Image (cartoon, grey):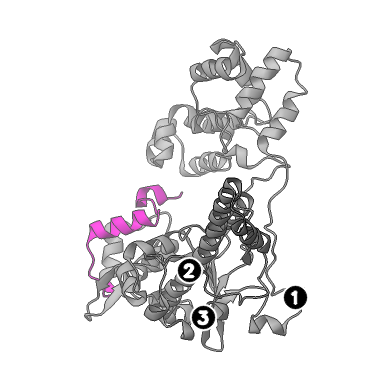
Amino acid sequence: MLQLPTIALEQRIKEEIEMNPALEEGVDKEEEPNADLEGEDYEDAPSEEDHQLEDFTLSDYMDDDEGISYKEKSSNKSPDEERKEIPFSVGNSFQDVLEEQLGMKNLTEHQHQVAEYLIGNLDDDGYLRREISSIVDDIAFTQNITTTEEELKYLLTVVQDFEPAGIGARDLQECLLLQLKRKEVQTMTVELATEVVEKYMEEFSRKHYDKIAKRLDLNDEMLKEVMHEIVKLNPRPGNSTSDGQKSQQQVVPDFTITNEDGILNLSLNGRNYPDLKVSKEYVEMQKEYAKEKSKAAKEAKTFVKQKLDDARWFIDAMQQRAQTLLYTMNAIMEFQREYFLTGDETKLKPMILKDIAETVNLDISTVSRVANSKYVSTPFGTFLLKTFFSESLTNDEGEEVSTREVKKILMDCVAAENKKKPLTDDKLMEILIEKGYNIARRTIAKYREQLEIPVARLRKEL
């Protein structure tokens, strides 16, 4: 459970409660909320001896509704309280919009079923990326509907005539052409743009504008107009339906770091998993079955004991999980204290998994599971923990600096460059050397790729 993010953990808890009637929501009135339960020790969980729990208790950091001193200062409905429900986007999907338009077409029932199946095969961008022949076979096996490639191709043209323009295309070139041909006024610019997409798509995608201008005999001004006409088109029509909204996975931070007058406060987001307790009814049931000697009672006792043991194990695992997360995040926060105080990425220190693993006395694999799937909310934004880990470089002064610092400089350079003459990797290397970072060109290329920054030629604009 350690690697589960907050929303996935909420679902995991719901499933466990449904499967185990001995596990219930709520706080046991007779026990302290964080009292130790019976059960085994777990490798991934820090012990009290290893981490001195008396100085770093779960209740001090849990972002919950009860027992938190900073929340006692605000009312139950104040804005700084977390909302328990998870918001979700509403609206029709683009498939719904297409099916509505399909209903207005004069098609036979058979054609309607086939076209509806086609719409269901469009991906989130609105493309049909499957072979027509494969769809013919699939619809026969799954829907028991017989069709032909010719009929599918015809019905695809019907779908491609729907709004938004470009829907149902099989690749980017077809998507752009569908939109250009849908233009109400076919100006000279639109006609030239259509010719570029039809005949010079590779040159356009590689930004070889000089080749396009030469082959179409275009001056600079006309070339700009043609390129502008193309870049205005939507390469992902499935994401732009007029009344639909694409649902997106919500990122819920697992931790929150706040800065109160230079003091960093860390809290664990507890909103998506409730207090858990062992069912008293099942405890009493176990006692009753223990008094009876019949075979049926013995079997019932075994069943009840198993459910109680599972419930105790799950509650204990949840507590150990929370402690492990807090120890790990606290170590990361302390290691990168300067960054969390200022938000200045140049303050990030080189930090690898081993540094934190040694601090919290856990395996590197355990720290890795925490870092790869958890988010932290800070005054400067919400980030995946693994983004704070980086290797080190040595500058001209012999100081170790984080590779994040170098990447930040690269991003700033690219953001400020002249897009008509973007900076090459060689030029970026020269800039970094001037700033005191002795770094090779191949390393520049590696960092640029990690930042998903295209090569200079592809960043060029007219």
Q: Give the CA separation, mark 1 to mark 2.
A: 31 Å
Q: Is residue 393 left or right of residue 323?
A: left
* Residue sitting nearer the eye, 194 or 65: 65
**Residue 204 visible within the image:** yes
At x 26%, y 59%, the residue is: 443
Residue type at mark 2: give it: Gln
- To which residue does mark 2 refer? 320
Residue 131 location (% of width, % of height): 48, 22
> How many neighbours does mark 2 have within 10 angstroms: few (below 14), some (14-19), or many (20 or more)?
many
Q: Earlier in the sequence, mark 3 or mark 1?
A: 3
Q: Give the CA separation, mark 3 to mark 1.
A: 26 Å
Q: Secondary structure at mark 2?
A: helix
- To which residue does mark 1 refer? 78
Is residue 146 covered in magenta?
no
Q: Residue placed farthest to the bottom in the image? A: 261
Figure check: 334 above or below 3: below
Q: Is residue 423 left or right of residue 293?
A: left
- To which residue does mark 3 refer? 57
Residue 233 location (% of width, % of height): 58, 39
**Residue 250 visible within the image:** no
Of circles 1 and 2, which is in front? 2
* Residue sitting nearer the eye, 411 or 376: 376
Residue 417 location (% of width, % of height): 41, 61
Residue type at mark 3: give it: Thr
Figure check: 397 above or below 10: below
Q: Secondary structure at mark 1?
A: loop
State the extent of the magenta-drawn residues as a range. Answer: 434-462
- Numbered circles on residues, count: 3
Residue type at mark 1: give it: Ser
